[in-house]
Image: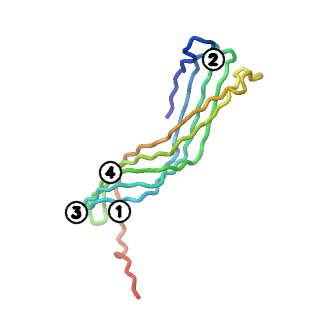
Amino acid sequence: MSRTTTSLGDTTGGPGIVPGAITESMSSHWLATFRGRAGFAQDSWLVYATGGLAVANVSYFDQVCFGALARVPSCNTAASSGTRTGWVVGGGIEWAVFQNWSIKAEYLHADLGHTTNTSILVPTAGGVNPFPNATINHNHNFTEDVVRIGANYKFGWGGPVVAKY
């Protein structure tokens, strides 16, 4: 996901911050879940709830640029990437179509937590930064909602395991 907007700057009428161009993007390169499921079976139907661990590789990019109206044209930029863990919950329905085949539909909601990136002001024309403490915190909460349909095949390898003494 990516979005771009313009900040209002200082709306108090004082000599504050000028408007700036804001760009941010967030992406998940992959998502894996490790879940259990429990439900109610009736004839060839299973209605279930599921939940467990979510793991994803997530990237963030944030930039705020202050242009020609600024005393010092500059940008604040921050980026991070890494593997994050969180939780996942959901539910679904599965129907046994044939002896070893079933079809299902399910919904999952994954929450990969909160992260903050801090960016430092850098003049775009180079030179000395007159505002070395001018930082911006970029806060992100990353969630994913997944709807999927699928088909399952159950291998029939001789029935249940029975212990023999």
Q: Amino acid at mark 3?
A: Asp
Q: Which residue is mark 4?
A: 105
Task: Report helix, strand or loop for mark 2.
Answer: loop
Q: Earlier in the sequence, mark 3 or mark 4?
A: 3
What coloring was used for the rendering?
Answer: rainbow
- The answer to the question of whether label 3 and label 2 lie on touching residues, with beta carbons closer than 8 A, is no
Give the CA separation, mark 3 to mark 2.
Answer: 67 Å
Name the outermost residue toward the left: 43
Residue at x 56% of width, y 25% of height = 22
- The answer to the question of whether label 1 and label 3 lie on touching residues, with beta carbons closer than 8 A, is no
Q: Earlier in the sequence, mark 4 or mark 2?
A: 2
Front disc: 1 or 4:
4
Foreground of the two, 48 or 116:
116
Foreground of the two, 96 or 8:
8
Residue 136: x and y in percent read: 62, 29
Q: Which corner quadrant of the image does residue 96 belong to?
A: bottom left
Q: Amino acid at mark 4?
A: Ala
Q: Which corner quadrant of the image does residue 7 belong to?
A: top right
Q: Earlier in the sequence, mark 3 or mark 2?
A: 3
Q: Earlier in the sequence, mark 1 or mark 3?
A: 3
Q: Which residue is mark 3?
A: 43
Q: Which residue is mark 1?
A: 153
Q: Amino acid at mark 2?
A: Gly
